[in-house]
């Protein structure tokens, strides 16, 4: 499928062979955020150097939750993780849902709507599963641009929340939802 990146992208399940590439995407995002002085979202440590993050990504691969948007040469343009349940800090709902647990775009593809492509895939996957609800949470601090981006994708704000963190300020988040019907 051609998207606004100008590249032929396809989305496929991530495999263990993709782990290093997925972590490299996340590390690139970390470098960019740190360079902007935006460390409240994810801190300053590379995901590839954090055993918990490496384990978390491998677990998502093992559970078939992680997808990668790749070019014809298999370059990872974006990462999407979906499951039937939110993280522990989000209250579950009384109906089946598709929850976006992670959405990230390689900095090499900045400004090319890879994120929108990944959102479209999550919505299509929810429809294929016969689900009417897609939810996602995001960082709600700094300038609010991330919240605005999800709203522009068709999500509606549900509720703000905070995740307590030991020795650091709480992580401010916003829960979003999208109804498919």
Image (cartoon, rainbow, N blue to C red):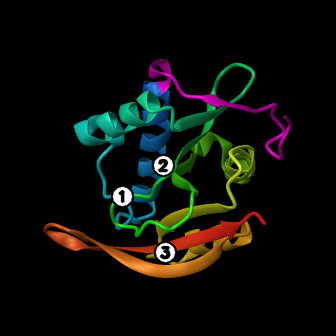
Most common SS among magenta residues: loop
Relative horizontal placement of residue 87, taking residue 109 as reference (left or right): left
* Residue at image mark 2: 29
Relative horizontal placement of residue 113, taking residue 46 as reference (left or right): right
Relative horizontal placement of residue 76, taking residue 113 as reference (left or right): left
The answer to which of marks 2 and 3 sits earlier in the sequence is 2
Residue 9 among magenta residues: yes
| Label of residue 42 in the image | 1
Spot occupied by residue 49 in the image (x, y as percentages of width and height): 27, 36
Q: Is the residue 18 above or below the residue 85 in the image?
A: above
Residue 115 among magenta residues: no
Seen at 83% across and 43% down, the residue is 3
Residues 88 and 148: in front is: 88
Q: Is the residue 143 above or below the residue 74 in the image?
A: below
| Label of residue 174 in the image | 3
The answer to which of marks 1 and 3 sits earlier in the sequence is 1
């Amino acid at each position: 499928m051609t998207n606004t990146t100008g590249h032929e992208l396809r989305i496929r399940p991530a495999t263990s062979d993709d782990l290093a590439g997925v972590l490299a995407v996340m590390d690139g995002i970390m470098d960019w955020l740190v360079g902007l002085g935006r460390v409240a979202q994810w801190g300053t440590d590379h995901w590839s150097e954090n055993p918990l993050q490496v384990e978390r990504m491998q677990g998502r691969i093992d559970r078939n939750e992680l997808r990668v948007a790749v070019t014809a040469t298999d370059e990872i343009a974006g990462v999407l993780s979906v499951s039937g349940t939110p993280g522990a800090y989000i209250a579950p709902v009384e109906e089946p849902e598709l929850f976006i647990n992670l959405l990230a775009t390689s900095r090499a593809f900045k400004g090319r709507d890879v994120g929108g492509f990944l959102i479209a895939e999550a919505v299509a996957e929810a429809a294929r599963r016969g689900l009417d609800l897609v939810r996602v949470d995001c960082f709600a601090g700094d300038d609010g641009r991330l919240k605005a981006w999800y709203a522009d994708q068709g999500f509606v704000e549900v509720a703000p929340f905070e995740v307590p963190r030991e020795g650091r300020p709480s992580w401010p988040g916003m829960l979003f939802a999208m109804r498919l019907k």
